[in-house]
Each structure stands twice: as structure tokens, then as C-alpha cells.
Amino acid sequence: MDPPTVLSNMRIVISRYGSRYGGNPVGNNPEITSALNGGNTNGAKFITEESGLRINGQGQLVDYWGTPFFFHQLAGHEMEIRSAGPDRIMWTADDLVTK
């Protein structure tokens, strides 16, 4: 699965969570990962193997290159999701970003 598709799937997972629970999951990457992977009031899992999303050994959702996603809450139902891109360094020109 290509990097833009993985990032798009991350956005879809966040959106599905928001639709079910009335807002985005909150916290840092491991807390958001937990909420999306069953650590919520209903035990609902939003992360599937088919989505191409992966969780590292520290319990963080990671991008195509294995770098943890950066989640920035913009509003209750809007979140910026950033992948560090192929250089694996955040805030450089090759970052991939979606809202």
C-alpha cells in the first residue's frame, strides 16, 4: 500500500471514531492508538490489517516508513495528521499531511 493511501486510511479511521463517539480521540500518539484499537468505552476497534496501519512496539501508530504519526487536534472533529515522509524527520518538505 502506498504512503498517501496509508495516510488517507489514518484519516478515515479518525473520522469513523469521531462519528461514533462525537469527537476525535485525544492525547498523544499512544493514547490515540489505544482509543482506536479498542481502548474506548465500547471496546470498538477501528484499526484493521487491511487499512495498512501499523503499531510499533511502543504502542504508536506509525507511517509507511515506521515513524510515529504526529496528531494535532484542530477542533473537536478536525485533526491534522502528519507523516514525516521518507526522510523520517518531521517538519521538512517531504512530510505528508492530511486533515
Image (cartoon, helix red, strand yellow):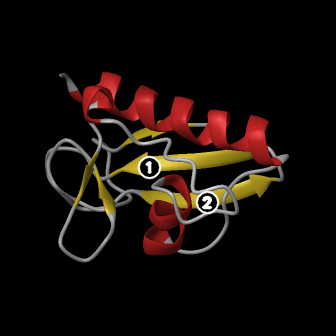
- Residue 82 disc label: 1
Image-quadrant location for residue 77: top right
Q: Are marks 1 and 2 in contact (CB under 8 Å)?
A: yes
For image coordinates 63% across by 62% down, the residue present is 40
Amino acid at the residue labelled 2: His
Q: Nearer the viewer, residue 41 or 5?
A: 41
Crowding at label 1, few (<14), some or many (≥20) Cα neighbours within 10 Å?
A: many
Q: Quadrant of the C terminus?
A: top right
In the rendered image, residue 8, in percent from the top left (x then y), is placed at 44, 27
Q: Residues within 10 Å of mark 2 (few under 14, many from 20)?
A: some
**Residue 85, image x and y in percent?**
24, 45
- 57 to 15, vertically: above or below: below
Residue drawn at x 18%, y 73% is: 57
**Which quadrant of the view contains residue 43?**
bottom right
In front of the other: 50 or 12 = 50
Image-based side of 58 in relation to 24, left or right: left
Label whose residue precedes the other's in the sequence (1 or 2): 2
How many discs mark residues in the rendered view? 2
Q: Amino acid at mark 1?
A: Arg
Query: Where, quadrant-wise, is the N terminus in this rendering?
Result: top left
In the picture, residue 67 is in which quadrant?
A: bottom left
Q: Residue at x 60, y 47 (%)?
A: 80
Residue at image x 45%, y 38%?
A: 10
Q: Which residue is mark 2?
A: 72
Report x, y in % for residue 6. Answer: 31, 31
